[in-house]
Amino acid sequence: MASKRKKTSSPPSGRSKLSCFLKWSGGGVFVLAAGMGLTAFLGWQSYTCPGPLSTDQDIVVPHGNYATTLSSLQNAGVVPTNWWSGRVFLSAVALTRRDGQLHAAELHFPAYASIAQTLWILRHGKPVQHKLTIPEGLTAWQIQALVQAAPLLTGDTPLPEEGGTLPQTYTYLRNSSRKDLLAHMQTSMAQTLKQVWAERESGLPLGNPQELVTLASVIEKETALPDERPSVARVFYNRLQKNMKLQTDPTVIYAITQGKPPLDRPLTHTDLQTASPYNTYVYTGLPPGPICSPGKAALEAAAHPAKGDMLYFVANGAGGHNFAATLGGHNHNVLLLRKQKTSH
């Protein structure tokens, strides 16, 4: 009996090999594409979702590379500290490079800022502006102390010229120089004074812009009421034109203190005899210089006084003053003030 020959399997053909490869590689491509898609989805989600910062904050972003920037933001709580968020941040920096360079500065970040918002702030946000207000009527010593005490500035504050800084609110960046900020205040006064002097009323008995500042400083110290400043200016001008002493208390106080410590007591009759050119009870005319830094409103009042023949004014007990053209009228106003004080 003849034995049956076993069938042997033939090797796969080239076409079947290609088919198997395509099936395998197709599956691999699908898996790879799916993985990339998932990564992109998770990356976009991390890029746009709210961050961990719980409140608005001003944060200093230091100079350095992108890793330094990331580290500072993670330490400040703007960007999550996990590895994935760090990779998303650095990848987003690279992918959005055409949007601009990242800046090192003190920047404001809102609560829950996303990585997308954070990058926009790093590229387009303006540095945080800090504010310092110089009130009207401060002396040079007081202004020096105020600037010296202002936070986030560098260096010491030089003593400014009396009356040489303009009272208003100023803005500055962290680590700005106190000297530069003070110079800006002085430039503001110089520019304001130039304008006010150029537009002043004609015929005023003033020889130069500095005399305008001097008179405005006395007005500033005499009244805080805007409506009264032109009337106070008129009283002083009328007295100057009649060669009468100004007899204004703030100049005596300045003569005693030189603008340093405030006088914490009422003036006495002895004080009114203080031998100082600033004492307008002793010397005729304007003081030799300003007794404080007047605001723009006081400068404008000195440049545009009210009309009238008044020569006197005295407090009315209600925060303002009563004005009079004669000594008799003035004495009457003084009597009214005394009666008001005794009735209380």
Image (tube, rainbow, N blue to C red):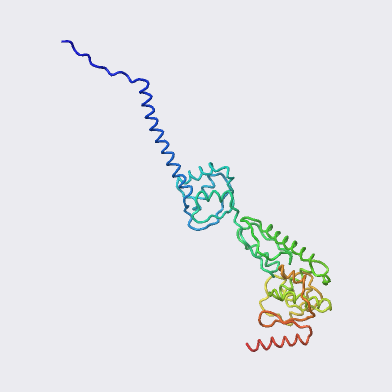
| Residue name at image x 72 percent, y 67 percent | 296
- Provide residue 151's location: percent of width, then percent of height: 60, 60
Rendering quarter of residue 235: bottom right
| Residue name at image x 44 percent, y 39 percent | 36
Query: Could you tell me which quadrant the C terminus lies in?
Result: bottom right
| Residue name at image x 72 percent, y 61 percent | 188
Outermost residue toward the top in this view: 1
Rendering quarter of residue 84: top left
Query: Could you tell me which quadrant the N terminus lies in?
Result: top left
- Provide residue 85's location: percent of width, then percent of height: 47, 46
- Provide residue 222's location: percent of width, then percent of height: 71, 76
- Vertical relation: 112 (above or below) 94: below
Outermost residue toward the left in this view: 1
- Vertical relation: 174 (above or below) 318: above
Left or right, residue 237 beside residue 155: right
- Using the image as rendered, state which of residue 11 and residue 186 is in the foreground: 11
- Using the image as rendered, state which of residue 1 and residue 330 is in the foreground: 1
- Provide residue 144's location: percent of width, then percent of height: 68, 64
- Using the image as rendered, state which of residue 1 and residue 181 is in the foreground: 1
Numbered-mark total: 0
| Residue name at image x 64 percent, y 59 percent | 171
Left or right, residue 183 beside residue 12: right
Left or right, residue 329 beside residue 4: right
